[in-house]
Amino acid sequence: MGKSRTKRFKRPQFSPTGDCQAEAAAANGTEPEEDDGPAAELLEKLQHPSAEVRECACAGLARLVQQRPALPGLARRDAVRRLGPLLLDPSLAVRETAAGALRNLSACGGFEVCGDMVTKDIMTPLVALLKECSTGLDSNEMSPQEKKDQNRNSIENIANEAVNVLWNICECSSRAVSIFNKEGCLEIVLKYLSRFSTNVDLAISVAYCLQTVTEDNPELLKSFSAPALHVLESAMLSPVNSMEYILLKTLVAGTIWNLKDIIPSKSQAEIINAILKILSEVLEMDAGETVLQMKEAETQRIKTAAETEDTLQNVNGDDLIEDDEMEGIPQRRKVRRKAFISDLLPPTDKELRETIALLTAQQTALEIIVNMCCSEDPTDDEWEELSSSDESDSFMENSLSECGGQLLSPLCLSHEVHTALTNYLIPKKIFEKTAFPNSTAVDVCSRNPSWKPLIRKMSTIQCRALVCLQSLVSLLDVDHLGGPAALQTLAQHLSQLLFSQPDFAKHVDFLEAISSALRALLQTVASKNIPQTIGCFLLEVATKDPSLVVAGEALDALFDVFADGKEAERASVQIKLLSALKEFQPVFKMKIRKEGRAKYSPDQLCVLDNVKMNLRRFVAYQETVEKKLTT
């Protein structure tokens, strides 16, 4: 059976605030400016003798680069070459803010800006900074405790910003990846990753970067020694199960999958089982329920902090004295409002950050599974036949960090992936993720501006699950998908999704993903001579639904699902699609003429006219199909 190959997923460009232009403008209370006056002033201040002024200028540029119209002006004034030296500024604060400005520039500028940054040699000071941070972390361990903690935090914060710059640039520039290889950056970032138990944020940034640079990079793969693999193993097997660590382990699992060609053959089954065990555990979690629980936790935390603040204020009464009135008062009676507010209120985005980490982990897990299902041979559009086995799900009796041995062929890798997918019930979990996001969670997020972006993230998980489902339906045996009855249920589920999604999910990605999943399911069902649930359902919606808009969507889905392929041709004949559409065609045209202007908007009428034209063409195509099959 012919199968279409699914595209491999690349991560979207990181944006520190979501929509760079709109959100930055909103945060500053201004619209983006067309001239580059602010850029010129800020860039001048980068040369100021005061470290504090240089730091403020870098922070200003970090905000300015988020306004897309400001980018050309910054390019004209050579912002990259002027920011680059500040990565090695004597002041740690300046280094951090300069790296932050370059991070935002690389994230908001995209491929063109990142390419320009490499051309202007940002990699030289960036690599030097990464090396200095690595050395600084080692030397700090010999310092007194108080100084050690302070400097290590600063250095790790700088390293985190620098790794994000490196990640963004390597995502967009093959030349940057080549420099990464030649300058020995792997050893540096792995040292940062090894600190995952004390700085998970830095470890996550490194894991993202590693997942990028290890993809299709055979030169780098040669540099992975046994100790390097051991660092990855330790991070992936971390016993901590906070949502940040779940994201970290998912990203590391994706990196290890990229390294599969250097894993010894005797460890292949264990490695694949370990990866898919992690992905299975990530997908097991209910994202909608997590959103509700974490939002409630945030609400309770803020409420408790406010109540505690009121209690302390009442207890101290008149002892709550402003700073300028405290002179001469015994120290034990000083209670300042500003001090205890900051002590009692943890970072306000704690729960939000954890929730985003889980949603990102689930999206990443689905993308890794899709990539695992892609053909190893770019010229081969079909996978070899897969079969199940009794492989144990135990992990690494022999350590992942063993090197050498014969490599497995793509056929054997496919076999092991198939086994692990079915052992961990991943098809069932992916099926569950294709359902619409929890409506209560969507409602809660929609009423809270800082949580509202999570609606789109939940919708993206649904789309990724649909693409993943398409791959699995094409690759797995019917029995491993639950048998014919499960496929019929799945067909009905997908068909209903197509016509009942809330407005936020009506976007191109969703429609493309669900159409592809339906098409793959149709091919599998037809090839196994399973009764057509899909076509019958779509045909019924198209011909029976009172709304022309819904009928038009159903017709569009029919056109897409039955567009081509031998299985689709046989299925269309089985359900007598041609005769049904020929009978419905004049009815559809008449309803548009009679009801159109009264019930539907001009945009809807334009879409319906296109559907009407496509219906005529599709009927002609089906006549050709039926003639071919009956002669």
Image (cartoon, rainbow, N blue to C red):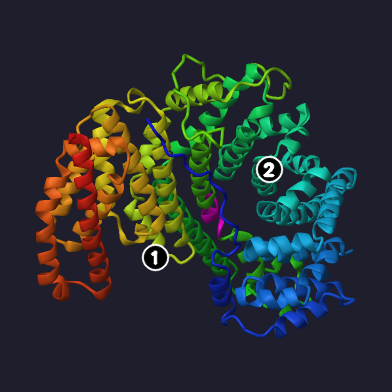
In the picture, measured across the screen, residue 503 lies left or right of residue 218, that is left
Q: Position of residue 303 (x, y in %)?
A: 47, 61
Say which residue label 1 marks. 447
Crowd tier of the residue under label 1, counting other residues whose Cα lies within 10 Å: few below 14, some 14–19, many 20 or above: few
Q: Position of residue 554 (x, y in %)?
A: 23, 53
In the picture, measured across the screen, residue 492 lies left or right of residue 378, that is left
* Quadrant the N terminus occupies: top left
- Magenta segment: 349-354
Q: Majority secondary structure of the magenta segment?
A: helix
Say which residue label 2 marks. 210
Determine the residue positioned at 19% across, 34% down. Answer: 631
For this rendering, which residue is in front, 376 or 414? 376
Q: Position of residue 27 (x, y in %)?
A: 57, 75
Q: Quadrant of residue 548?
A: bottom left
The answer to whether residue 103 is seen in the rendering is no
Asked if the magenta segment contains residue 84, the reply would be no
Find the residue positioned furthest to the top: 390
Label pair 2/1, CB-CB below 8 angstroms: no
The answer to whether residue 42 is seen in the rendering is yes
Q: Quadrant of residue 505?
A: bottom left
Vertical placement of residue 426 versus 504, above or below? above
Vertical placement of residue 53 versus 297, above or below? below
Determine the residue positioned at 41% across, 49% down. Answer: 463
Looking at the image, tell me whether mark 2 or mark 1 is earlier in sequence order: 2
Q: Position of residue 378 (x, y in %)?
A: 56, 37
For this rendering, which residue is in front, 246 or 623? 623
Asked if the magenta segment contains residue 352, the reply would be yes
Query: Which-is-in-front pick, marks 2 and 1?
Result: 2
- Say what secondary structure mark 1 lies in: loop
